[in-house]
Structure formats: structure tokens, C-alpha cells
Image (cartoon, rainbow, N blue to C red):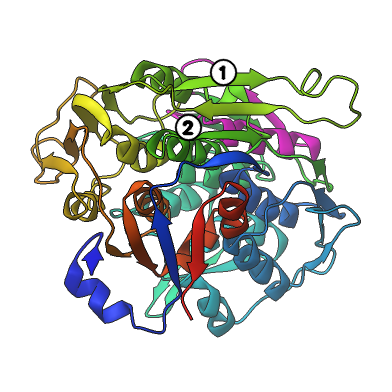
């Protein structure tokens, strides 16, 4: 059995009763699937509903585990959450927000890192909040130091206890001038969700400006917030005393769209991803084309001439000739997204020459390559920075650069999924490999990929659950 990270760690966590997907590889994926709203926006927009004084409606919500977790946390705090009339519609009524016990919150904490973002909204609504020990994927430490420091700057009092951190705001929350040491998405979300109802003006420098951040700002503006995005990563938030509910259709999930694109390339197939949007994926599309992959943008207005309600997207396919090696570096937006690299590395194992992947966002995100090597890939990881992008991990003993030699013929193996994005990469590798693989812990993929087994079936993949 092949493990994506530490074999010892996974032998402790995975048993024969874990969810197993049997994958008969070697068949090109062909067909059409659809992506819904972005996972990295949906959960934050759900938290934002806490800030309103009337119900909010969120559309195109995917049926994924992270949504279930956040829904449970909202309901623990008295928010009435119900399904709307439309498929994928969620209605959240925060009229009767209330406290939740630490034990109840801890039940959910192991499955998500979202509880940290509840702090600002709960401090505004209740005057207190609780942060348990945080879970999430094991891809390197994601410290909450800045979250805590920012909340203190706003006026929160933090009391550290064995079970977690209790926060209060005896004098309310007030605007602050803040600067991030790194344009962290999570820290930027924390500031936005806290500043919108803080008294006075907040200025955040070196902020993240990912599409999901801008979409969250759109949500908050619909609620009555006053937020200005300046040049040079500066965001200014003018606090308001109250907010109301919103109605919002989120941007599509660019990570899922890119994952299916990589699957088309790795399996020498053709996949049309309905709902995918060019504007959010321009950096990925440039790389996809540089490798030799082909794609076609289908605008929704001309997607199906004469058909009412037709939806556009992006069609991705393998060109039929050799793929070309590339040198890549992950970076914050508008750079190449860190969540795109794992699925694409699988495709790069099929490209001729030496490809380079320099990971600059998370320091421990290349462990999944061990499993690919045991499937026949040739990937070396290095502590050196193999690229020119300024990197926080140089000379810090982290293996954060990879060299991929190809093309390599992949063969089947038994795999254990280590985290969400690496898990989908392992799944792609199993689909591209000759023979039958068994993928253990596959339900972890449900955290971020809606209905992925039925989507695989629609694309002609030969997969089945092990009984």
C-alpha cells in the first residue's frame, strides 16, 4: 500500500473499513460535468450571514462536506438553515443567534478550520466567541497568530484555555490599521468579517486579492458594508452599525475546474467543464496551453444556439501529441494557485523533459509525490528554491521544490489519500495508470468535490466502491 505522506501516520489512521474506491485505469475520460460555487467562497459567505439582521440566500451551493460542517456550526449558534426552492439554494436566518457549548463546537472542529472565522461575527452579535483546536488538511502549519493579533487590534480580549481560546469584546470592536506579513487568504477574510461592523475605519495592507476574496467583498457590500479595494493590495473598510441579509450566486470553483482539466490531460481525454469561467482561470489556462493542452471557451450566450438556459464553460482536451515540460512556481493571486499544482503534476509526469514545480505558499505540499514515484513516476523533491519567486521556505529545510522527469508510464497501486487536493491528484494518477488501483479514505475528496463519483461515471471512468 502506498501512502502520500508518512506511512506510519496513515497506518494509524486508515483501517480496512475505510471508504475504498476501486479504479480500473487506462481509459481516457470523455464527457461533460458541471462545477458549482467555489468551495473557498461558499463557506465564508455562509459565515458572513451571521453578520446580518435578516435572512440571506446563497445559490449554486455544492453538496460537499465543508458545507455540511459550516451549516452545523451555524445551526449550533441558533441560525436557522434550510434548503431553498432551487437546487443548490441555501437560506440562512440569523435572527436568533445564540451561544454554543465548547463541547458542541469541538465536535465540528476536527473537520474544518472555519471556526476561527466565526470570531468577528460572533463578537459583534453576542460579545463573545470560542476557538477550538483547528483541523483541516495536513499540508503544513497554518498559524492563527495573525488572526488572534488582528482580533486584539480590533479590541478583543483573548483568554487561552486548555480546550481552546475564549474571546470577548467588553468595549466593542473598533477599526484598526493592519498589515499582513504575507497576503494570507484566511487572515484577509478574518479582517473583512470583523471590520465591516467595527466602529471606525480599518485599513488592511498586503491583503490577499484572490477572486474568492473579491467575491466575499461583493457579498458584504450587498449586506450594506462599505469596502474599497485600492491598488497595491490595500483594502479599506468603513465600519457600519448594522448589516442585512444578501442574495448571491458565487463565482464557480476554479480549483475543481482545473482538477478536471488536469484529469483530461493525464488520461488523454476530453472534458467539458460547464460553469467554469475564463476570467478566474487565466493563469492556469496559460500554463495548460504551454504544456500542450487544448481548451475552448464556450460563452453561455452562444453555448447552445437556440437553447434557452444553455450554460457555457471550458472544454479541455489532450492534443494527441507529446506534452511539453514546463517550469512553474505557485504564488498568491494572480500567480499560479497552490491548489492547482497537485493535479497538474500528475499530468506533467506524462510530459517530455524535466518539469519544475516550486511551491511557495505551503511548505509541506509535495509529500504526495512519494506515491506517484511508486506508481512509476520520476519525481525528485528538493529543499532548494528552484525558481525566482521570493520564497519564505528557502534555507529552512522544507522540501518544497520538485523536478518531474517524463514521460513516465504509471502502473496501478493501492493508495491512501493524505489530504483533499493531493487526494484528487492520487485519483487522477489511478485513472491514468494501467491496471486496477484501490484508493483508501476516498471520502475525504467529498470535502471539496461535489458528487465526484457520479461525475467520474459520466466521464466513462471505470470505478466502483469496494464492498
| Residue at figure coordinates x 57%, y 59% from the top left | 453
Residue 55 visible, this orientation = yes
* Secondary structure type for disc 2: loop
Relative to residue 444, is residue 118 drawn left or right?
Answer: right
- Which residue shows up at 26% across the image and 72% down it? 10
Please report the bounds of the magenta region as a residue range.
205-233
Secondary element at image label 1? loop
Dividing the image into 4 quarters, which one contains the N terminus? bottom left
Residue 128: x and y in percent read 61, 67
Q: Mark 1 points at which residue?
A: 230
Q: Is residue 49 magenta?
A: no
| Residue position for label 2 | 208
Residue 43: x, y in percent? 62, 53
Image location (x, y in percent) of residue 333 = 45, 27
- Is 229 part of what is drawn in magenta? yes
Residue at 36% x, 16% y is 290
Amino acid at each position: 500500500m502506498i501512502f502520500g505522506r508518512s506511512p506510519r501516520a496513515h497506518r494509524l489512521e486508515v483501517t480496512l473499513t475505510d471508504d475504498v474506491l476501486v479504479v480500473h485505469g487506462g481509459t481516457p475520460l470523455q464527457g461533460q460535468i458541471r462545477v458549482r460555487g467555489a468551495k473557498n467562497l461558499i463557506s465564508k459567505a455562509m459565515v458572513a450571514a451571521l453578520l446580518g439582521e435578516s435572512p440571506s440566500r446563497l445559490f449554486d451551493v455544492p453538496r460537499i462536506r465543508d458545507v455540511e460542517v459550516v451549516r452545523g456550526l451555524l445551526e449550533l449558534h441558533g441560525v436557522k438553515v434550510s434548503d431553498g426552492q432551487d437546487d443548490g439554494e441555501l437560506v440562512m436566518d440569523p435572527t436568533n443567534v445564540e451561544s454554543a457549548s465548547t463541547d458542541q463546537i469541538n465536535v465540528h472542529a476536527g473537520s474544518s478550520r472555519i471556526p476561527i472565522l466565526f470570531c468577528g461575527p460572533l463578537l459583534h452579535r453576542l460579545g463573545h466567541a470560542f476557538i477550538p483546536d483547528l483541523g483541516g488538511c495536513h499540508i503544513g502549519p497554518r498559524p492563527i497568530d495573525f488572526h488572534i493579533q488582528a482580533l486584539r487590534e480590533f479590541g478583543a480580549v483573548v483568554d487561552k484555555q486548555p480546550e481552546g481560546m475564549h474571546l470577548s469584546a467588553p468595549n466593542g470592536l473598533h477599526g484598526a490599521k493592519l498589515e499582513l506579513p504575507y497576503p494570507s487568504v484566511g487572515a484577509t477574510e478574518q479582517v473583512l468579517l470583523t471590520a465591516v461592523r467595527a466602529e471606525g475605519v480599518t485599513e488592511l495592507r498586503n491583503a490577499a486579492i484572490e477572486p474568492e476574496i473579491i467575491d466575499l467583498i461583493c457579498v458584504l457590500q450587498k449586506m450594506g458594508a462599505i469596502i474599497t479595494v485600492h491598488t497595491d493590495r490595500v483594502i479599506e473598510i468603513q465600519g457600519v452599525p448594522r448589516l442585512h441579509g444578501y442574495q448571491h450566486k458565487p463565482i464557480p470553483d476554479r480549483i475543481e475546474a482545473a482538477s478536471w482539466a488536469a484529469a483530461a490531460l493525464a488520461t488523454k481525454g476530453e472534458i467539458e467543464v460547464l460553469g467554469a469561467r475564463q476570467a478566474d482561470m487565466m493563469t492556469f489556462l496559460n500554463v495548460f496551453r504551454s504544456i500542450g493542452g487544448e481548451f475552448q471557451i464556450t460563452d453561455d450566450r452562444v453555448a447552445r444556439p437556440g437553447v434557452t438556459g444553455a450554460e457555457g464553460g471550458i472544454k479541455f482536451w489532450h492534443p494527441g501529441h507529446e506534452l511539453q515540460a514546463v517550469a512553474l512556481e505557485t504564488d498568491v493571486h494572480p500567480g499560479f494557485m497552490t491548489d492547482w499544482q497537485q493535479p497538474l503534476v500528475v499530468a506533467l509526469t506524462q510530459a517530455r523533459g524535466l518539469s519544475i514545480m516550486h511551491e511557495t505558499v505551503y511548505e509541506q505540499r509535495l509529500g504526495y509525490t512519494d506515491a506517484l514515484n511508486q506508481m512509476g513516476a520520476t519525481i525528485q523533491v528538493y529543499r532548494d528554491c528552484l525558481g525566482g519567486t521570493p520564497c519564505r521556505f528557502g534555507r529552512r529545510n522544507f522540501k518544497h521544490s520538485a523536478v518531474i522527469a517524463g514521460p513516465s508510464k504509471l502502473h496501478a497501486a493501492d493508495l491512501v489519500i493524505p489530504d483533499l487536493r493531493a487526494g484528487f491528484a492520487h485519483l487522477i494518477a489511478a485513472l491514468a495508470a494501467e491496471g486496477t488501483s484501490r484508493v483508501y479514505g476516498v471520502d475525504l475528496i467529498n470535502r471539496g468535490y461535489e458528487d465526484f463519483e457520479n461525475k467520474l461515471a459520466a466521464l466513462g471512468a471505470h470505478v466502483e466502491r469496494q464492498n
